Each structure stands twice: as C-alpha cells, then as structure tokens.
Image (spheres, helix red, strand yellow):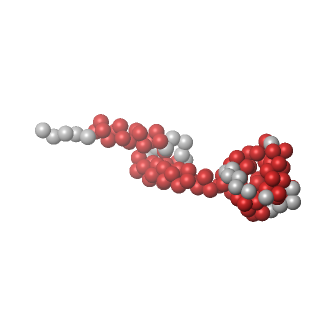
Amino acid sequence: MRIKKGVTAHRRHKKVLAMTKGQRATRHSLYRRAHESMLHSLSYAYSHRRERKGNMRRLWISRINAASRAHGLTYGQFMNSLKKSCIEINRKMLADMAIREPDTFAELIRFGQNA
C-alpha cells in the first residue's frame, strides 16, 4: 500500500511559514523562500546569542573603565590592583557596583591602591 505524505508535508510547511511570520515579501509566504530565510534566521540567532556575551563583557569593561578613571586609575591598573590584593569580583558585578553603589566601588579602589 502506498503512503501519501500530504498531511505531513502540509504540517511541516505550515510550521516553517509560521516561523517566518513577519518577514517581507515572499519570505513569509512561499515555502521554499521561507525555508531559506528560516535557516538563515536560526543560524544568525544562534551565533548572535554567543556574540551577545562578548558585547556585554565589552560594556562592563567600558563602565568599569569610566568609573575607575573618575578616581584616577585606568581600567588595567584597577584590575591589576584587584588581582594583587586577591579580590576576585567578576566584571559584571564590578560594572553593576560602579553604577549602583559608587561609594562601595570607591572603597574597592582605595583598598586596591593600598595593596
């Protein structure tokens, strides 16, 4: 007996077209174009999720740099002083501290300079 794949194919096509909803022109209405655009979109989403981590780190570093320069140190000097005084705080926490708790950040700088 022959098995027809009409229902399966239709379901798969509908899924792809649903994923490309919001795209322009034939990229959301024609299956073949939609499938191409979906593959590219998923690929970009995957790589950009990883890229975002680097972007966030860059942002934290620039915030820490700005806050430490306000106290007369460069970012590198500040991080070196933290390392020498065995203070292990990650950049995310340091950047957050620089914005939300400037007094605590100033204490860290003073503590680092004394070591």
Viewer-proximal residue among 65 and 56? 65
Viewer-proximal residue among 109 and 100? 109
Q: Is residue 66 visible?
A: no
Question: Which image quadrant is residue 13 in?
Answer: top left
Residue occupying the point 22% across, 39% down = 4
Residue occupying the point 26% across, 40% down = 5
Residue 17 position (above or below residue 75): above
Residue occupying the point 55% across, 47% down = 24
Image location (x, y in percent) of residue 34: 45, 48
Furthest-left residue in view? 1
Q: Is 35 on the left or on the right of 52, as rendered?
A: left
Q: Quadrant of the N terminus?
A: top left
Question: Which image quadrant is residue 96 in?
Answer: top right
Residue 21 position (above or below residue 76): above
Viewer-proximal residue among 73 and 39? 73
Q: Quadrant of the C terminus?
A: bottom right
Image location (x, y in percent) of residue 78: 77, 59
Q: Is 98 on the left or on the right of 28, as rendered?
A: right
Q: Is residue 20 visible?
A: yes
Furthest-front residue in view? 115
Q: Is 73 on the left or on the right of 85, as rendered?
A: right
Number of numbered markers: 0
Residue 10 position (above or below residue 63): above
Image location (x, y in percent) of residue 59: 71, 54
Image location (x, y in percent) of residue 74: 80, 62
